[in-house]
Image (cartoon, rainbow, N blue to C red):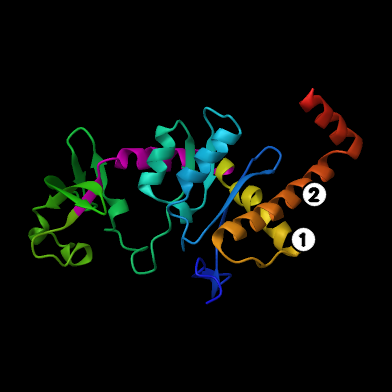
Amino acid sequence: MTDPDSRRMKNNGSLDICYNVQSVVDAKNHFVVDISTTNDINDQNQLYTMAQKASELLEKESSTVLADTGYYNGTEIKNCVDAGMNVYIKKAKANNATKDNEFRKEKFIYNGETDEYTCPAGDRLRFFENTSKNGMKYRKYKCTDCNSCKYKKDCTTSSSGRTIQRWIHEDVLETVYNETLNNNEVYKQRRCIVEHPFGTIKRSLGYSFFLRCRQENVDAEAASMFITYNFKRLLSMFSTKEIVTKFEESVM
């Protein structure tokens, strides 16, 4: 009632009226490069915007982006890759109902040369139509051997056979998936890099809620919090004399 820009979101396991604070932190010095507050209830549409802004601020032609599963969005990931970024991100794990199912989509193998899938039972799913959803284009594949397969009940309830849809840029996501697995030790550093400033701001500096209303004002307040963090971080890395010297060198 007092802040029409705020939204009800999950906050530490409970529901609160709040904002979603985005941040980008550099891995070398652990300074907060950029922040933004949004009233979007999740992070799925924030990856490219934040990564691109940080790259521009750091004047980087190429960079490596580490992001948690909450940012997993095919279009956002592709935008980052198209902009020359290396993206390491993991997809959310399957829910309890499907994680042990041997016939979930992840178990089907795609063959790019023949443009078809092979199911865990060895049957093939061939392309049969193009489709779209939420502005994204997909290719749909269908198995015609389901009725004679002894695993049909475990695989699908459809009388016409199992179908799988594939985003037309799915190869980008597959490449990102493989590169993330191959660089898992790098990816695991993400939580130590980006989560640490939030912990310091909330627990050490005592900023656990906003005092201002309306998004523009909250954004400015959040920026001041992270500037405080950066200054605190700077003082822990250099003496006052070193900071003054570096400042003088930068303005000469």
Kind of residue at badge 2: Lys
Which mark, by number, is residue 205?
1
Q: Which residues are magenta?
A: 164-185
Residue of label 2: 232
Kind of residue at badge 1: Leu
Quarter of the figure with the C terminus: top right
Identity of the residue drawn at 45% across and 38% down: 179
**Up-down relation of residue 221 to residue 67 (above or below):** below
**Up-down relation of residue 86 to residue 134 (above or below):** above
Depth check: 162 or 86 in front?
86
Of all residues, the one furthest to the top in this rendering is 252
Residue 183 drawn in magenta = yes
Depth check: 21 or 6 in front?
6
- Please tell me in which quadrant of the rendered image residue 30 appears: top right
Provide the major secondary structure of the magenta segment.
helix
Identity of the residue drawn at 74% across and 46% down: 230
Pointers 2 and 1 in contact (CB under 8 A)?
yes
Identity of the residue drawn at 54% across and 44% down: 66
Residue 157 drawn in magenta = no
- Please tell me in which quadrant of the rendered image residue 160 appears: bottom left
The percent position of residue 94, horizontal first and vertical second, equals 38, 61
Depth check: 64 or 202 in front?
202
The percent position of residue 3, horizontal first and vertical second, equals 54, 70
Tag 2 secondary structure: helix
Q: Earlier in the sequence, mark 2 or mark 1?
A: 1
The percent position of residue 21, horizontal first and vertical second, equals 57, 57
